[in-house]
Image (cartoon, helix red, strand yellow):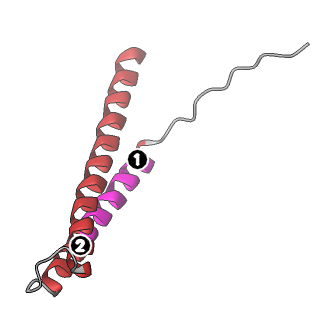
Amino acid sequence: MAKMISVKPIEQSKTAVDRLFQFMNIMAWTCLLIGVVACLWDITHFSDTNMTLMVGIGFLIGSVFIYTSGAALHLVSEMLEALDDSSNK
């Protein structure tokens, strides 16, 4: 016969989530800076064949996704913590 066991989900500590949010925030700003520099590198040749411009635009768009993902992770973590605190009262 097989034994059934229950496994508790791993709880993320608030400091780990905050560090991840801070890291993603720094990476988003870094990507934004790289994107701006790459876009301005050869702005005179404004065309879709300009590889540095296309890579720069990619970094700009990527920075928005990174920042949004980090902010969503932070908000979900705070919401789960608030729900956990309210259920423990």
Image position, residue 56 (x, y; %): 23, 73
- Position above or below: 39 against 88: below
Q: Residue at x 84, y 16 (%)?
A: 3
Quadrant where the image shows the C terminus = top left
Foreground: disc 2 or disc 1: 2
- Position above or below: 4 against 9: above
Image position, residue 83 (x, y; %): 35, 22
Relative to 83, is 39 on the left or the right? left
Q: Which mark is residue 49?
A: none
Where is residue 72, by image quadrant? top left
Observer-nearest residue: 70 or 54?
54
Observer-nearest residue: 82 or 3?
3
Q: Residue at x 32, y 26 (%)?
A: 82
- The type of residue carrying mark 1 is Val
Q: Residue at x 36, y 36 (%)?
A: 77
Q: CA distance from mark 2 to mark 1?
A: 33 Å
Asked whether residue 47 is drawn in magenta, I would say no
Relative to 11, is 88 on the left or the right? left
Quadrant where the image shows the N terminus = top right
- The boundaries of the magenta stretch are 15-31
Where is residue 80, by image quadrant? top left
Residue at the disc numbered 1: 17
Residue at the disc numbered 2: 54
